[in-house]
């Protein structure tokens, strides 16, 4: 598996929404603010947030004090959910995700390795929440 900049930036950006999450009166966080704090192009972030919104991970509010908010608590949003929203899958290989990708898939012992690896990685990503990522990310950035 190769996590692209989209996946890495999505997680970094969502840490800011997780910090602002209160459950009721969340403070919207603007792309401009995230862009500045994370040194990520705001245009690139806009594209990422389109996918996150479509996946139901974030919602937008318009207006002068608008921005984005999480749709649920950070401890209920998994890293897997985020990566699935912005990446083209989380499989180590295409043959592990799609049996029809290769004509040898049904009789390939190596494919079994990739399928097992995908299960382990997928389980880990599903168990790792945005709350966990946020705590580590904010902690490390405060040390800089």
Image (cartoon, grey):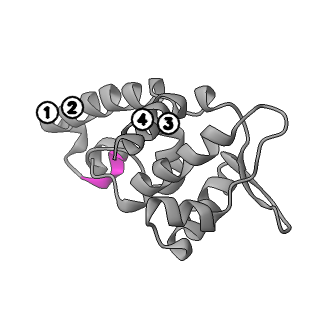
Q: Quadrant of residue 20?
A: top right
- Can residue 128 be seen? yes
Magenta-highlighted residues = 98-102
Residue appearing at x 51%, y 29% in the figure: 129
In this view, the residue in front, 135 or 130, is: 135
Question: Which numbered dot is residue 109?
Answer: 1
Instruction: Give the CA distance from mark 2 to mark 1.
Output: 5 Å
Lower position in the chain sequence, tag 2 or tag 3 = 2
Decide: marks 2, 1 in contact (CB < 8 A)? Answer: yes
Lower position in the chain sequence, tag 1 or tag 4 = 1
- Can residue 88 be seen? no
Residue appearing at x 70%, y 37% in the figure: 21
Nearest-to-viewer mark from 4 and 3 = 4
Residue behind mark 3: 134
| Secondary structure state at the residue bearing disc 2 | helix
Residue appearing at x 34%, y 50% in the figure: 100
Residue behind mark 4: 139
Q: Residues within 10 Å of mark 2 (few under 14, many from 20)?
A: some
In this view, the residue in front, 9 or 26, is: 26
């Amino acid at each position: 598996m190769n996590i692209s900049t989209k996946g890495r930036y999505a997680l970094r950006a969502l840490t800011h929404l997780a910090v602002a999450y209160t459950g009721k009166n969340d403070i919207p966080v603007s792309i401009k603010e995230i862009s500045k704090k994370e040194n990520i192009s705001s245009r690139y972030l806009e594209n990422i947030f389109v996918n996150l919104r479509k996946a139901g991970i974030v919602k937008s509010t318009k207006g002068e004090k608008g921005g984005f908010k999480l749709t649920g608590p950070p401890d209920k949003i998994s890293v897997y959910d985020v990566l699935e929203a912005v990446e083209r899958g989380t499989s180590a290989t295409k043959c592990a995700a799609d049996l029809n990708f290769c004509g040898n898939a049904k009789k390939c012992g190596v494919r079994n390795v990739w399928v097992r690896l995908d299960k382990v990685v997928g389980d880990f990503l599903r168990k790792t929440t945005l709350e966990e990522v946020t705590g580590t990310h904010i902690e490390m950035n405060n040390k800089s």
